[in-house]
Amino acid sequence: MKAHYGYKDGAGDFFIIIDTDPCIECEHHGCVAACPEGVLEIIEDDYDDEVAAVTEEHRKQIKYSCAPCKPDHDRPPLPCTTACTYNAITHSW
Ligand code: SF4
Ligand code: SF4
C-alpha cells in the first residue's frame, strides 16, 4: 500500500509517500534517525506491522519541515531516501 502524508495547495502537491509493503520488511528503520527534522516515526499499521509514517505534527507543514533538505538549486540526496535501503520513500515535490 502507498500511504500519502501531506497536502496540496495553490503552490503544488506536497506529499511524502511510504510504500508499506517493503517497509514492513525493514529492520533498521534508518529513515527515522536520518531525518534531521524529526519528520518520520515508526507506527503499527492495522495489521500490527511496523511501518514508517510522517508524524501528525509535520503532516500539515511538510513543505516547510523538509525545506532545509531541499534548497532551490543543487539539491543534495535527501537523508531519508538515502537511508531507506528498501526505496520505500518518495516525495511528490
Ligand atoms: S528505512 Fe525505509 S523501509 Fe525502513 S522503516 Fe524507513 S521507510 Fe520503511
Ligand atoms: S527531506 Fe529531510 S526533513 Fe524531509 S523527511 Fe526527508 S530527511 Fe526529513
Image (cartoon, rainbow, N blue to C red):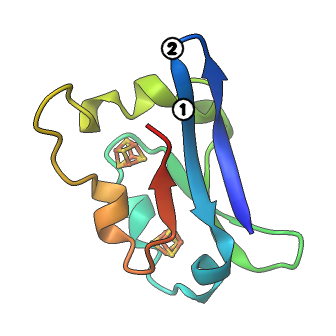
Q: Nearer the viewer, residue 63 or 53?
A: 63
Task: Say if 2 sits above or below 39 in the image.
Answer: below
Which three-letter amino acid code belongs to the residue tagged 1? Phe
- Report which residue position mark 2 lands on: 11
Q: Are marks 1 and 2 in contact (CB under 8 Å)?
A: yes
Task: Say if 69 sits above or below 54 in the image.
Answer: above
Q: Nearer the viewer, residue 1 or 60?
A: 1
Q: Quadrant of ligand 2?
A: top left
Task: Name the residue located 89 percent from the left edge and 70 percent from the top edge.
Answer: 46
Residue 83 % position (x, y): 32, 69
User: Which quadrant holds the C terminus?
Assistant: top left
Mark 2 Cα-neighbour bin, 10 Å: few <14, some 14–19, many ≥20 = few
Mark 1 Cα-neighbour bin, 10 Å: few <14, some 14–19, many ≥20 = many
Residue 9 % position (x, y): 62, 16
Task: Name the residue located 80 percent from the left edge and 69 percent from the top edge.
Answer: 45
Task: Name the residue located 76 percent from the left edge and 80 percent from the top edge.
Answer: 49
- Report which residue position mark 1 lands on: 14
Task: Say if 8 sits above or below 26 in the image.
Answer: above
Which three-letter amino acid code belongs to the residue tagged 2? Ala
Q: Quadrant of residue 32?
A: bottom left
Asked which secondary structure carries label 2, the reply is loop
